[in-house]
């Protein structure tokens, strides 16, 4: 049986290329091409975009992104065993799929991409959060990406879209929602993957805003938020005392009670605090 792109079904690809899943590589493959097509559609209009994909594996999502009309896909895959399968996809989409073999934590793909850029990935769970934090804390505005369409374990997805007052609210929510709209667009049970992971998964759609929601220096905001949530049970005047002896005045200038705890402070409040700290 062949699919719409005239490539073999993913089970055959895995068998023919001997791609037995490796836990050490965070390999939980999506073999249902209807599902990967659905995730690719969540990424929006790809026709004018370069798409960065991390961890294409046997290429299910890659095929979805290309069939969806992506101008070009740059895929970074650590496991060299996947390269022949990906080369077969590249042959069906001439000039539109480039694969880099290596660790996404060590490769900076920016110079190889032409804006507008979207990122789409069924991320290896062991590196997903670290990659997201990097994408959320670039040195420049606007971010180099228009959108991030990313699979995470459900608990991490909930941290990205969390609101103040919830246990999930923290650094990920603030960094994501400061510069983007973030929402969960799909939920996937473990048995959607081969092999099934222990946890459920969610696809998060993070769409860059034309400008940050509130003014703040990204470095200062990042630092303040990291410190505040590092000791999330402490009052802010204690958690942030490393920012200087006058931290209580800074908190008050931002309209925040020094006895407040980080998880009850809104995004707007943290941006005001970043401005008050930067004014030192
Ligand atoms: C959860 S699987 C997803 C595979 C495929 N995209 C799919 O949806 O079926 C994660 C993929 O990321 C790759 N990977 C793991 N760590 C990586 C890293 N540090 N850099 C790049 N790829 C990595 C794995 O080899 C695997 O192919």
Image: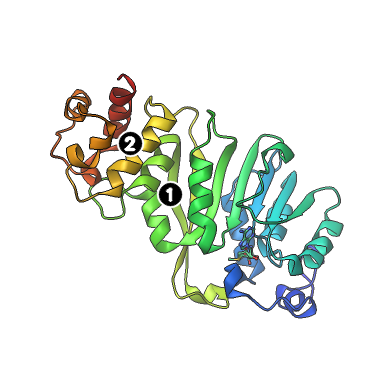
Mark 1, residue position: 183
Front residue of 277/72: it is 277
Q: Relative to 153, is 272 on the left or the right?
A: left
Distance Cα–Cα, label 1 vs label 2: 24 Å
Name the residue rendered at 53%, 31% in the picture: 139
- Is the C-beta of the residue carrying label 1 under 8 Å from the nearest atom of ligand 1? no
Against 175, residue 244 (above or below) is: above
Residue 28 visible within the image: no
* Picture quadrant of residue 46: top right
Label 1 secondary element: strand
Badge 2: few (under 14), some or many (20 or more) residues near its Cα, within 10 Å?
many
Mark 2, residue position: 224
Pinpoint residue 122: horizontal percent, then vertical percent.
58, 60
Front residue of 179/77: it is 77
Q: Relative to 267, is 39 on the left or the right?
A: right
Residue 154 visible within the image: yes
Name the residue rendered at 75%, 69% in the picture: 81
Front residue of 256/3: it is 256
């Amino acid at each position: 049986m062949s699919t719409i792109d005239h490539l073999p079904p993913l089970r055959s690809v895995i068998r023919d290329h001997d791609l037995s899943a490796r836990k050490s590589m965070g390999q939980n493959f999506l073999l249902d091409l209807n599902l990967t097509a659905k995730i690719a559609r969540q990424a929006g209009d790809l026709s004018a975009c370069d798409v960065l994909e991390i961890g294409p594996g046997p290429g299910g999502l890659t095929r979805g992104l290309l069939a969806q009309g992506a101008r070009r896909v740059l895929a970074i895959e650590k496991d060299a065993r996947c390269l022949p399968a990906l080369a077969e996809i590249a042959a069906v989409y001439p000039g539109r799929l480039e694969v880099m073999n290596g660790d996404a934590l060590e490769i900076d793909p920016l110079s190889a991409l032409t804006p507008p850029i979207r990122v789409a990935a069924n991320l290896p769970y062991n590196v997903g959060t670290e990659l997201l934090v990097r994408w959320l804390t670039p040195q420049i505005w606007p971010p180099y990406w228009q959108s991030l369409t990313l699979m995470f374990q459900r608990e991490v997805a909930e941290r990205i879209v969390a609101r103040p007052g919830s246990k999930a609210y923290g650094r990920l929510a603030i960094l994501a929602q400061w510069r983007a709209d973030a929402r969960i667009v799909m939920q996937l049970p473990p048995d959607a993957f081969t092999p099934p992971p222990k946890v459920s998964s969610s696809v998060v759609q993070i769409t860059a805003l034309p400008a940050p929601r509130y003014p703040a220096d990204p470095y200062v905001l990042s630092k303040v938020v990291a410190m505040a949530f590092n000791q999330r049970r402490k009052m802010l005047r204690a958690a942030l005392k490393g920012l200087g002896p006058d931290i209580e005045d800074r908190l008050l200038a931002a309209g925040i009670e020094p006895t407040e705890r980080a998880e009850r402070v809104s995004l707007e409040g943290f941006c005001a605090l970043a401005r008050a700290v930067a004014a030192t």
